[in-house]
Image (cartoon, grey):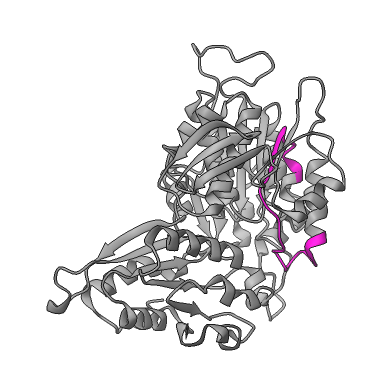
């Protein structure tokens, strides 16, 4: 079939496009504001992209329009539709569906789905789990909301491999598993259920849960209700343990979710009384199952959050027959996901006074929620030690952050950095007032140009510049490296 995807450059819809192309479908799509890594992946697949949502695209006459949740019935200030193509689809009575629904019907049906849900760590944990199953010879399909560096693609269909030994009785074999990042955000403007209720997982990971997505959820209880709806789709425990829920034992919110109803086998991780626990530092720790040594993880990742992510992935993999020892060994070769503490470059500052001194390192990270920002900073601080200078550059870009729902927690999230540079464009709240508890550490900039000038002026040899955003951040990473190399603090108009 020919599918045309509206909002194709989002991480989920871009992954769906890759899977559809791998199945042999003709795939086209449209979007605005394209940026890597998804745009690069789509171009490499030869998928035709159309800029914008113009009505002329109705003339493509695809078999199905697949609608991303970025699309709405919103109107601009002059009353015209913001997404005119969607209006044309409705007027023409053309066939359309949501991304999660299309995925459920054409990719997930008949497979052992392992779904990773949670406010934080979904992408990283999904990538870990896919890599564990790959290392164990299970050749899973996957859809990750980022690009795992072990695979270099965000999605893969996979297929059984001839000549592979048969799996244990009742266990999925090579190509039978599909690992998916299970987002609680709504499905589409015409389907306000969370995406993950479409996936029907046999293994469900509940990594953590706190309030987010203030644009669609009124409070934490509303999100907890959606997580319980996910649990209602997981098979029961049964004589063979056909369904499993892996849950973070440290989270009171998840305890409430389970209490509201759970019919499956439960495995916990993280708390002292959990099934799976860790002993040691996040970069090198023993994995304990019911208090007994079951494996050891030694890897370059840092932060307690990644240690918990690892335990979740190990517990989920065990459900499909991969032992904790094999999983732990596989994680030693895990290379993380692009834009998760990814080093974009290091550059020596110019001038004779800086000759021979340590370079400035620029990192890219996807953190955007205050808790994610704090855990990201904490992981870098643990790795670098207390004396290293960390300069945080961040933009409150999500709908939740733009609404100001989390603004009071930003000083807490940034308290371990030496300087914090906030890109304030598009905010409907007073950033200076919100960041006042940081004192002189807080710097505000209304444009990317001004942010660059401030950072270049403040940078010293050996500094670590941590850029955090769930978007392209105006290409700030490469602009920083170029500006630091030359010492230039004036930038052409419109460079942002």
x 44%, y 49%: residue = 301
Say if residue 17 shows up in the picture. Answer: no
- Residue at the far right: name it: 260
Where is residue 186? Give x, y as percent.
73, 56
- Residue at the far left: name it: 352
Where is residue 44? Give x, y as percent.
41, 44
Q: Is residue 241 above or below residue 206?
A: above
- Give the quarter of the image for residue 485: bottom left
Relative placement, left or right, of 291 versus 301 is: right
Where is residue 221? Give x, y as percent.
82, 60
x 50%, y 54%: residue = 303
- Which residues are drawn in magenta? 197-221
Relative placement, left or right, of 239 versus 150 is: right
The stretch drawn in magenta includes residue 51: no
x 69%, y 45%: residue = 100
Residue closer to the observer: 12 or 269: 269
Q: Is residue 19 above or below residue 257?
A: above
The secondary structure that most of the magenta stretch takes on is loop
Count of marks, rendered view:
0
- Residue at the far front: name it: 291
Give the quarter of the figure containing the C terminus: bottom left
Give the quarter of the figure containing the N terminus: top right
Say if residue 117 shows up in the picture. Answer: yes
Residue closer to the observer: 370 or 196: 370
Where is residue 173? Give x, y as percent.
60, 19
Relative placement, left or right, of 103 versus 241 is: left
Residue closer to the observer: 144 or 381: 381
The stretch drawn in magenta includes residue 202: yes
């Amino acid at each position: 079939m020919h599918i045309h995807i509206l909002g194709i450059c989002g991480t989920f819809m871009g992954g769906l496009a890759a899977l559809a192309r791998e199945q042999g479908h003709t795939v086209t799509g449209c979007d605005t504001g394209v940026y890597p890594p998804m745009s690069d992946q789509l171009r490499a697949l030869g998928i035709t992209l159309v800029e914008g949502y113009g009505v002329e695209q109705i003339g493509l006459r695809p078999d199905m329009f697949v609608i991303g949740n970025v699309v709405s019935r919103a109107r601009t200030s002059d009353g015209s539709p913001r997404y005119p193509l969607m209006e044309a689809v409705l007027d023409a009575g053309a066939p359309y569906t949501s991304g999660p629904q299309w995925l459920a019907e054409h990719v997930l049906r008949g497979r052992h789905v392992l779904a990773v849900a949670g406010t934080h760590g979904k992408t990283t944990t999904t990538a870990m789990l896919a890599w564990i199953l790959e290392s164990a010879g299970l050749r899973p399909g996957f859809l990750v909301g980022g690009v795992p560096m072990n695979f270099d693609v965000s999605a893969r269909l996979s297929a059984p491999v001839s000549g592979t030994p048969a799996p244990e009785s009742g266990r999925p074999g090579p190509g039978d598993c599909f690992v998916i990042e299970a987002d609680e955000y709504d499905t589409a403007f015409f389907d306000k259920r969370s995406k993950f209720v479409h996936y029907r997982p046999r293994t469900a990971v509940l990594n953590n849960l706190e309030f987010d997505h203030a644009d669609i959820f009124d409070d934490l209880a509303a999100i907890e209700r959606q997580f319980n709806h996910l649990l209602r789709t997981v098979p029961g425990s049964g004589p063979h343990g056909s369904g499993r829920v892996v849950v973070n034992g440290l989270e009171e919110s998840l305890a409430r979710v389970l209490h509201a109803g759970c019919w499956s086998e439960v495995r916990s991780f993280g708390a002292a009384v959990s099934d799976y626990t860790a002993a040691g530092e996040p970069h090198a720790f023993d994995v304990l199952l019911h208090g007994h040594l079951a494996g050891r993880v030694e890897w370059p990742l840092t932060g307690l959050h990644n240690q918990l992510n690892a335990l979740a992935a190990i517990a989920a993999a065990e459900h499909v027959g991969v032992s904790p020892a094999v999983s732990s060994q596989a994680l030693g070769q895990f290379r993380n996901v692009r834009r998760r503490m990814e080093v974009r470059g290091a550059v020596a500052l110019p001038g004779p006074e800086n000759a021979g001194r340590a370079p400035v390192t620029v990192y890219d990270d996807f953190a955007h929620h205050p808790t994610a920002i704090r855990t990201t900073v904490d992981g870098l601080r643990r790795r670098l030690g207390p004396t290293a200078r960390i300069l945080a550059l961040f933009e409150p870009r999500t709908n939740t952050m733009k609404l100001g729902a989390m603004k009071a927690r930003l000083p807490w999230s940034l308290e371990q950095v030496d300087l914090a540079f906030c890109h304030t464009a598009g905010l409907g709240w007073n950033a200076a007032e919100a960041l006042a508890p940081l004192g002189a550490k807080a710097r505000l900039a209304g444009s990317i140009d001004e942010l660059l000038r401030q950072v270049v002026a403040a940078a010293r040899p050996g500094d670590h510049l941590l850029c955090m955003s769930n978007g392209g951040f105006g290409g700030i990473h490469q602009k920083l490296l170029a500006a630091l190399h030359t010492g230039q603090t004036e930038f052409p108009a419109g460079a942002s």
